[in-house]
Amino acid sequence: MKPAKPIYLDHAATTPTDPQVVEAMLPYFSEQYGNPSSAHRFGRQAENAIESAREKLAQLLNCGRSEIIFTGCGTESDNMALRGVAMQALAEGKRAHIFTAHTEHHAVSHTAEQLARLNLAEVTWLQPEPDGSITPQRLQAALSALRPEQVGLVSVMYANNEIGTIQPIAALAEVAHAYGALFHTDAVQAAGQLSLDVQALGVDMLALSAHKFYGPKGVGLLYLRRGIRLYSAQTGGAQENNQRAGTHNVPLIVGMARALELAYADLPARVAHYTRLRDRLIDGVLGRIEGAYLTGAEKARRLPNHASFAFTGVEANALLMHLDLSGIAASSGSACNTGNPKPSDVLLAIGLAPDLALSSLRLTVGKQNTDADIAYVLMTLPTAIERLRAVRQAQGLL
């Protein structure tokens, strides 16, 4: 029986804004609405709110306040890091050499491709393991190509948005630094599930986006280790230490800080809840559906809330439509590529055949999901796949 309320299992795409976050933001839309760059009391109120949020975020990331740069989203943060390093190197008469992988979010991989195409940087593509991980050994071998006159930048995401694989960031950063390279990580999917202690991780730059951890859309940050210079992302004002000109979005910045604070206040309980539901999904799907494969890393090395699969004889868009009509909201991978008929770069990079890559399903649980939700999915999904395979067989496609 179809659930009375749709079951949302696409938390890797976005999360609902927590009511406590909305409450924290509201005064800055209509009461304390000053421009934080203004000298009068309204401006000072707004500036104080921003700096309070910055302090809170710095504590959660274990860094200095001046090392937090506010941005509009995770994609902007990633672009700021890669483009900023490449352009700063050119400004100093050098050339950047970027080491990254096709398993990265397009905010990184497409940016690296563009920089190489425009001859603004050299790019070396790292080969991932079949589970999507980048090993320190592979990175070390690649970094041997870094020349003394180049500025090295390694960019490896903390956890993969499509397949859930968690990378050994601290070990990779250590290798990068041994070769004199900077290390950037896209931590957008990891926030609210894994530690963001930048000192323990050893990273030089780290990107976040608030809407992935029950905060508002349209705001993110870049952690930039003190002493590292980036070429300014945009000009027109002195905001964010001259790194990002433009009027601050005060309500969203306040909301992001509150959301991350809430996420880490109950992290152990939240992770336990995610993991239990995720494991039920993984075990149930693999145990009930023939021709089902888990994509990405094993349970111990994947995000607590993340389950991703590929199915033989199934087309992902048809499966998603069937699930949606059955009251289940899911995804075939990155929400940034929804509707793209081409196989995922990530799945191809880890060795999946194109037809299998086109059958991917991502189910990502959230704090409001229940055991009943998972039970309904495990009842509905096998039937949906059986019907879709029967249709393809009747069409002579199997």
Image: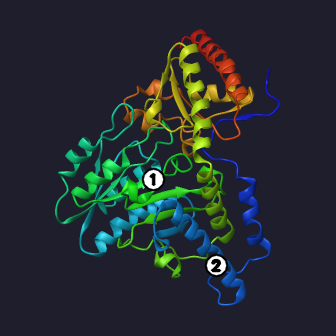
Kindly identify the residue that appears in the image at 74 percent across and 59 percent down.
Answer: 22
Sequence order check, earlier mark of 2 and 1 = 2
| Residue drawn where x is 43% and y is 27% of the image | 354
Measure the alpha-carbon separation of dots 2 and 1.
28 Å
Indicate whether 124 appears above or below 55: above
Residue position for label 2: 48
CB within 8 Å, label 2 to label 1: no
Amino acid type indicated by mark 1: Asp
Residue 29 to residue 324: above or below: below
Q: Reply above or below: 123 against 31.
A: above
Front residue (pair 301, 118): 301
Q: Residue at image x 56%, y 70%?
A: 54
Amino acid under disc 2: Asn
Q: Closer to the camera, 270 or 33?
A: 270
Element marked by disc 1: strand
- The 10 Å Cα crowd at callout 2, few under 14, some 14 to 19, many 20 or more, is some
Q: Is residue 343 left or right of residue 378?
A: left
Residue on which the image places disc 1: 186
Residue 223 versus residue 304 in the image, above or below:
below
Q: Position of residue 145 (x, y in %)?
A: 18, 52
Splitting the image into 4 quarters, where does residue 202 fall? bottom left
